[in-house]
Image: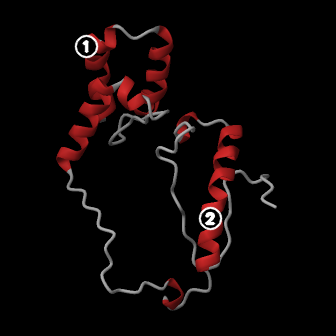
Amino acid sequence: GNRCCNYVIQYLTSEEGKVLSSSEIQMFFKCVKSGIEHPKSSLGCYAMTPGNYSKFSGFFDKIISDYYSEIKYITNWNTGNANYNVSKIGGQDKISMCVRVGRDLIGFNLPGQMSKEECTKFELKLLPAFDQLTQKYGGNIHLLISNLATA
């Protein structure tokens, strides 16, 4: 099974897991539901709120440690003197880019716990940043909530 399935029983029978209230167990189930339903997935669990990482730390710490012990993840945003201009990529009339945001934006749940209303508020909060991107680079912003009025 996936990492989620490997650690669920161990966590629920741990000292931390044994003292969870029924509402906390319901939230924990939301975090692990995907892994239970899809045992072939690599990770299989997703925090619903930023607080889940601390509330269920005995579970998430093991999952994250296990996951990163197998891969070497290196991020380096330093481009040196390179000037990356996507308009110079040949053969493309239009270029599409997905901006992934909101892993831990204060005041919002993580995507798995967001309602449509909260997602709309989230997108409205991000519009000023997206406006800066379009002013600098051009293009259009297409929001996830299709009926959101941006005017």
Q: Nearer the viewer, residue 67 or 16?
A: 16
Q: Classify 142 as above or below 63.
A: below
Q: CA distance from mark 2 to mark 1?
A: 44 Å
Q: Is residue 120 left or right of residue 21?
A: right
Q: Give the residue pinned by disc 1.
A: 14
User: Which residue is found at the position 57% from the left and 72% from the top?
Assistant: 96
Q: Three-letter amino acid code at disc 2?
A: Phe
Q: Which mark is residue 5?
A: none
Which quadrant of the view contains residue 25? Answer: top left
Q: Is residue 138 left or right of residue 44?
A: right
Q: Three-letter amino acid code at disc 1?
A: Ser
Q: Position of residue 30 (x, y in %)?
A: 49, 26
Looking at the figure, which quarter contains the C terminus? Answer: bottom right
Q: Classify 94 as above or below 11.
A: below
User: Which residue is found at the position 36% from the left and 34% from the top?
Assistant: 39
Q: Position of residue 118 (x, y in %)?
A: 66, 39
Badge 1 marks a residue whose secondary structure is loop
Q: Position of residue 145 (x, y in %)?
A: 71, 50
Looking at the figure, which quarter contains the N terminus? Answer: top left
Which quadrant of the view contains residue 7? Answer: top left
Badge 2 marks a residue whose secondary structure is helix
Q: Residues within 10 Å of mark 2 (few under 14, many from 20)?
A: some
Does residue 87 appear in this view?
yes
Q: Give the residue pinned by disc 2.
A: 130
Q: Nearer the viewer, residue 142 or 34?
A: 142
User: Which residue is found at the position 60% from the left and 62% from the top?
Assistant: 129
